[in-house]
Image (tube, rainbow, N blue to C red):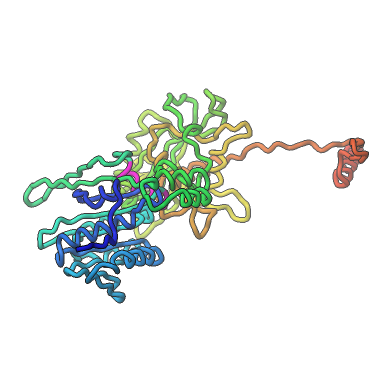
Amino acid sequence: MTYQIIWQPQQGPQTDLITCPVFEVFFGGARGGGKTDGMLGEWIRHAEDYGPSAIGLMLRRNRVQLIETIERSKQIYGRLEGWEWKEQEKMWRSANGARLRFAYLERDSDAEEYQGHSYTRIYVEELTNFPDPKPVMKLMATLRSGAGVPCGFRATGNPGGPGHQWVKARYIDPAPMGYQILHSSFKNPWTGETIAKERVFIPSKLNQNRYLGSDYVASLQMAGNENLVRAWLEGDWSVIDGAFFDCWSNERHIVKPFGIPGEWLRFRSMDWGFAKPFSVGWWAVCPDKFEGIPRGALVRYREWYGASAPNVGLRLTAEETADGIVSRETGEKIAYGVLDPAAFAQDGGPSIAERMMKRGAIFRRADNTRVGPRGAMGGWDQMRARMKGDTDGNPMLYVFETCRDFIRTVPALQHDPDRPEDLDTDGEDHVADEARYGCASRPWLPKQTVTPKPNDLTYEVQPDGRVVSNMSIRDIVLAKERRRRMEIE
């Protein structure tokens, strides 16, 4: 009997994905690594093994992205005997009764609609398009089977996007080279039993896809700048293209901790958060040039980021937060503090700011101007100006290497797609907002180099015979006006 091969995994990461028994797998990295095919192929094997007990859900962030995944599924599944596409339900039913439904989560709240469902496989394409992990984590709660089918979560993604940071923290940072199984333990509150869940990162690389050659590589190289090309070709998660703060440099702005001299002015800035993280930053102002740091520069020497996980708050009360701030300032003289203006709002009782000040954490309202009107400098402009630095190229903002959450989140933030001069608030922007308040509390502008206008009119004969003046007609008029005023005085 002759068999026709409709689809088979490529040797390497695609095969590793399909045969991986780990509960949670992230298959990501470079573009063109065969990630979508890997997801669709993994479902074929799962459907064949478990028949009508296999129930899958394939997700994308929006409808447009979902269409492309569906079209690719039709190219593969449509050639399989007995597989039928249900257009109205957006679902494939295999010959043995396995079902794979396609859907999209355009809003994080859409995940609520799936609570109560039961799936044996969940696939999420382009995981970095999800700015917050919470809807994805909620979907994991639907992985269960009364028939004893081994359940699993599979996701793909490339570097970049609003969810870059949390995806990188969950899958890449613990094992950058991949293939290392990570364990998370959970305790059953009724039985006391400890359950371990496993997850693994399988890197996908373009050069491991034999169907895409040099022409596709050239297309990627044409499409972006050097950083973007590195991220696309190599799957480099340390590269951030389209960064809002493209003037940030680890080499220029991060410094090793040093003893802050006693005479330096110190202040704090804060962005309030409860369900989302709060951020508190402590700053020192350099009064004169100090070990390469120019006069007037801000040095971030301490931070407290109230998060239990990326973009998930500690849920501390105002009083608990204030106590934590005060305890960290023991023996220090803090000149002032600036706080998110929303924390001063009153709603039938004392505001967050009032409650904190009663515990000794004193604040005033921060300037919350994000983008200045009609060319005026807003808070983001202040941060950029300090990052770019003075006319000698020295930054006017420095961060101790111990301020890990500033370093982790601020450089990765992206532009708002609808308002490019502002920051995309879907990202983990709490440290950036807090730092903006700090910079706005001490406005700074680089000195402008002004070329003095000439007072004396001279002429010079050029090699080609032209006679050139050192002054324009307007300069001549202004010079005469200056001389007239000097004579009157």
**Please, what is the dominant secondary structure of the magenta stretch?**
helix
Residue 120 location, quadrant:
bottom left
Q: Is residue 208 visible?
A: yes
Indicate the quadrant containing the C terminus: top left, top right, bottom left or bottom right: top right
Residue at coordinates 43% horizontally, 24% vertically from top-left? 259
Residue 167 included in the magenta stretch of the image? yes
Residue 78 location, quadrant:
bottom left
Near-viewer residue (54 or 296): 54
The x, y position of residue 13, in whole percent, is 30, 47
The x, y position of residue 440, in whole percent, is 53, 44
Indicate the quadrant containing the N terminus: top left, top right, bottom left or bottom right: bottom left
Residue at coordinates 41% horizontally, 41% vertically from top-left? 238
Q: Residue furthest bottom?
A: 88
Near-viewer residue (455 or 34): 34
Report whether 151 appears left or right of 377: left
Q: Is residue 353 visible?
A: no
Residue 34 included in the magenta stretch of the image? no
In magenta, the rendered stretch is 160-172
Query: Quick check: 338 above or below 219?
Result: above
Residue at coordinates 23% horizontally, 46% vertically from top-left? 199
Query: Quick check: 484 above or below 393?
Result: below
Query: How many numbered marks are there?
Result: 0
Query: Quick check: 57 above or below 352?
Result: below
The x, y position of residue 99, in whole percent, is 21, 67
The x, y position of residue 277, in whole percent, is 34, 48
